[in-house]
Image: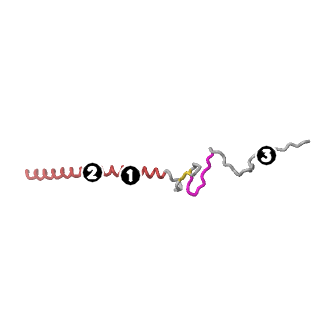
Amino acid sequence: MDRLNAKLYLQNCYIMKENERLRKKALLLNQENQALLSELKQRLAKTAAAAAKVNINGNMAKVNSNGNMTTGGRVPLPDLNSAPPVHGVGHDKGAPKTKKSIKN
């Protein structure tokens, strides 16, 4: 009986020692996992910031000299809050014409 108890005691000590070794390994793996997760989140944040500059079609958005956003081959939308564009000099096509008075 004592022999069996001694054998079981040694097995128990071995299991506890292995348990401690595995616990330390799990702790190190958890720390490594947290560091990798943090790095991944930083990379995703950078990627999201860069993706905010890309439009739906995958073209890079740019700001032209008028301050309007433009994209690759697309025509930018006009800024309806700005003054209308000035056309050719002496060209009054859009101006209303006055009626000449007729003398009787």
Q: Residue 53: percent from the left, percent from the top?
A: 50, 51
Is disc 1 in contact with disc 3, using a CB cutoff of under 8 Å?
Answer: no
Mark 2 lies on residue: 28
Q: Is residue 1 left or right of residue 67?
A: left
Q: What's the distance in space between the residues labelled 2 and 3, CA to CA?
A: 86 Å
Foreground mark, 1 or 3, reads 3
Report if residue 75 lies within the magenta region.
yes
In the rendered image, the residue lying farthest to the right is 104
Label 2: how many residues lie within 10 Å, few (<14), some (14-19) or many (20+)? few
Q: Is residue 90 magenta?
A: no
Secondary structure under the numbered disc 1 in the rendered image: helix
Of callouts 1 and 3, the N-terminal one? 1
Residue that appears at 43% across and 51% down = 46
Q: Which mark is residue 97?
A: 3
Q: Given the image, on which type of amino acid does mark 3 rest?
A: Lys
Q: At numbered mark 2, what does the secondary structure look like: helix, strand or loop?
A: helix
- At label 2, which amino acid type do we have? Leu
* Amino acid type shown at disc 1: Leu
**Image coords of residue 74 (percent x, y):** 59, 56
Span shown in magenta: 70-80
How is the model colour-coded? secondary structure
Cα distance in 3D space between marks 1 and 3? 68 Å
Among numbered discs 2 and 1, the one appearing first in the sequence: 2
Question: In the orientation shown, which residue stands out farthest toward the bottom?
Answer: 73
Q: Horizontal and vertical percent for residue 71?
A: 56, 54
Residue at figure coordinates x 13%, y 50% from the top left: 9
Real-space CA distance between mark 2 and mark 1, rounded to the nearest whole angstrom = 18 Å
Read off the residue under disc 1.
Answer: 40
